[in-house]
Image (cartoon, rainbow, N blue to C red):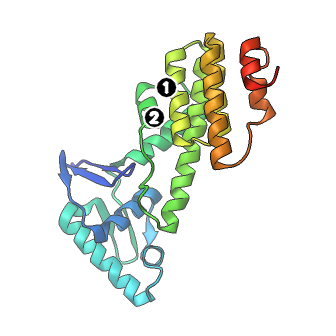
Amino acid sequence: MPPSARLALMGTLELDLHGAAVRVPSSAQRLLAFTALRRRPLARGYVAGQLWLDSTGDRAAASLRSALWRLHRAAGDVVWASAREVGLSPWVEVDVDAIGAAAHAVLAGERAHPGDVAALTVSGDLLPDWYDEWIAVDRERLRQLRVHALEALCERWTAERRFGEALEAGLAAVQVEPLRESAHRALIGMHLAEGNVVEAVRQYETCKRLMARELGVRPSRLMVGLLDGAAPRARRRLGTA
């Protein structure tokens, strides 16, 4: 039976093998993360070229061999290698996979399970302290996928009057992407559906300040329109009365 391993990429890279934490050498971490995010056999030349962009082909290939040796020494066969290809072993569980699967299930209209919600509301970002171009693309893709799913959950649970869960999903969406107006709109809609006009106004004003400070823009008419019929006092506070 193959060994069990769990790899976390949200926040910091952490590898757990047989229930024990494994210290992955820094020289091998990028290889482990790269193969984990691709989840398919990859040509050795492609991997070497992507991870060691500033090196010649021979030097990049040598760096790949060194990283594979160091990773195998620390964690066994979590990454397999042949003469032509490398890839993450299928028995390694990756937290990013769980997040992606949960998001796609929610967006497909499937019922959300507690594990899905836990995966989507996890704090942190995908290896935020890494600045490689390839990780930036994966980070943005995962961020957008998460926030779309969290907004969908917030709106779905609001319609089902499951306000506590809707609040959790909406707050998580705003945390993932604080400048995303649609995430704030989902929260405002939830507060209004629950009858909490003051909370809706407070969320609007939070969003308005963020957008003005960070982007120099105002909320859209669509967002202001959410509160048009809420209450005269709320409208006066917004300057829309």
Q: How many marks?
A: 2
Question: Residue 194 appears at what percent x and percent y?
Answer: 61, 11
Q: Residue at x 30, y 74 (%)?
A: 67
Q: Position of residue 24 (x, y in %)?
A: 24, 62
Asked whether residue 137 appears in the rendered view, the answer is yes
Query: What residue type is disc 1 on?
Result: Glu
Front residue of 77/156: it is 156
Query: Which residue shows up at 43% across the image and 86% down it?
Result: 55
Callout 2: 10 Å neighbours few (<14), some, many (20+)? many
Q: Which percent across, then down, holds residue 74?
A: 19, 64
- Quarter holding residue 85: bottom left
Given the image, on which type of amino acid does mark 2 rest?
Answer: Thr
123 versus 139 height, above or below: above
Q: Residue 227, can we see it?
A: no
Q: Nearer the viewer, residue 114 or 11?
A: 11
Residue marked by disc 2? 121
Q: Check the image and report above or below for 227 versus 147.
A: above
Residue topped by disc 1? 168
Residue 31 pos. (x, y %): 36, 67
In this rendering, position of residue 129 left or right of residue 164: left
**First of labels 2, 1 by sequence position:** 2
Dot 2 and dot 1 residues touching (CB under 8 Å): yes
Quick check: 59 left or right of 18? Answer: right
